[in-house]
Image: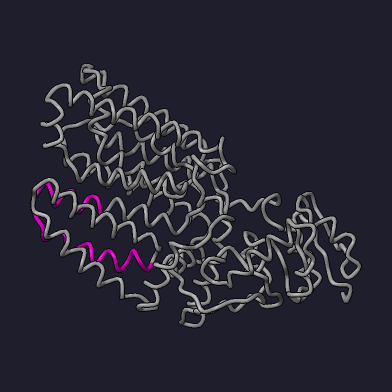
Amino acid sequence: MDFVFYFTILCFILIFSSMINFVDFDFWARLIVGKTFFQTGQLFNNDFYSYGLTHQFVDHEWGSSLIFYLIQEKTGDFGLFVFKSLIIFFTIFILTKIIRLKDKNIKLNFLFFFFALQAISYNIFSTIRCQTFSFFFFAFYLLILEKTRYDKNYRILYLIPLLNIVWQNMHGGFVVGIFILFLYGLGEFLNKKPYKPYFLTLIATLATTLINPYGIKYLTYIFDAFSLNRKYIPEWHSAFFSTNIPYTMIKFKIFFIIALLLILFAIIKAIKTVGFREYFKNIDKTKYLIILFCLIVSIKSLRCHPFLVYSLCAFCYVDFYNIFNKKLPEKIDNLKAIILMVLVFVSTVSHLAAFKFINQISPFEYPIYCVEFLKQNNIKGNVFTTFHSGSYVIYKLFPNNFIYMDGRYEETYDNSLIDDMADFLLDEHKNDFIKKYHTDIFIIEKHYPIYKKMLANGAYFKAYEDDVFALFLDNKY
């Protein structure tokens, strides 16, 4: 019945991948990097389309940029949709292989994975993003490390340094893989089992981190990234402690609480059965070190939620299954799975048959009409817009226009730029931005306080506005 499970999961992923087709704000920057690489044959370590203060930077997502651009160029949005769906599917496929290492005969229950994927739907079903590779490689690492433990075949650990070369050039999340490798060594040491192969692999993996276009500068950037101030990026906030998002991420929070309660229930039940001392002696320290690490990073940042959910799928599915499993006759159990597969398949086909495989660029999220106004009137000059819209604006307007900054502010721009932008948009008493930066064009979201001040600024006039955005031009136009 594995085919029924995998086919149902694939259909579910396809339908949900199509339901959330919003384009990530930074996706345009990825396309620009890919396009310039294939046009010039090089990676630029400076921002050539900004008039703000920039510096040489390390692009830890350059490999993803090449892949995204090639898919977009050759197959369009449909290719991106298929690629996104398949990489999510194979991530789940890998997790099920880890589960089967623990129990070869266990039944794979679709509903468990349904709730797991729903809990992180906002993270994995949106437009394909670079961190998708990190989630995939995270699962791949777990499979290699778990298979090593169960088969006691330490030769396959040599795959990890090779995979690290690929992962680190796709996304900076490879650091998670480094931590996971260290925790496996520590966990097996505490389990009083062979641990040296993991630390030797860790050393080899650290050595391969130098295999990238930037050399040692790449590692310096990754180290510095831990201290970056990301207060203006919601996805780096905590879903539990941030005052900006107290009532969001409800599905993840419910999954989070239920999973922890079930783990606690399983632990208490085991302690009552064998006693605390015996339980602690035989507990798999590696398993709980990994879960604890993923728990901490998921509490710290909502973009890390998939690490926790995937680790719970890999390590705790058997425990959860044994709690809820009811011994039904095999024929009835199989019939239920087949009926569910048919229903999901019919829903998927009926939805995709009428679906247009085009990523949605909403005028409520993007300054589409302001940008088109500038293009149609051939208006050149420096454009200020909020950093999340910057990549889209320059993707559409370069080389006639330059932007103040885009969403890569943490790696590309001088630290003062984001603070100056925030003061300009939000602080009614600070007026030195226009004097400090030579800006010809402003694209302003009208809910910001600066909108009314721009209306009263005699040096600029409002040339166009829609429901969300307003376009202000220097009087010289």
Residue 310: x %, y % from top left: 33, 43
Residue drawn at 30 percent across, 35 percent down: 5
In the image, taking residue 122 as reference, residue 329 lies left or right, namely left
Residue drawn at 41 percent across, 39 percent down: 117
Residue 83: x %, y % from top left: 42, 55
Residue 75: x %, y % from top left: 49, 61
Q: Nearer the viewer, residue 116 or 331?
A: 116
In the image, taking residue 249 as reference, residue 97 lies left or right, namely left
Quadrant position of residue 63? bottom left
Residue drawn at 76 percent across, 73 percent down: 439
Q: Give the range drawn in magenta.
A: 141-169
- Decide whether residue 150 is among the magenta residues: yes
In the image, taking residue 373 as reference, residue 358 lies left or right, namely left
Residue 470: x %, y % from top left: 80, 58
Q: Nearer the viewer, residue 297 or 123?
A: 297
Q: In this view, does 362 lie above or below 39?
A: above
Quadrant position of residue 64? bottom left
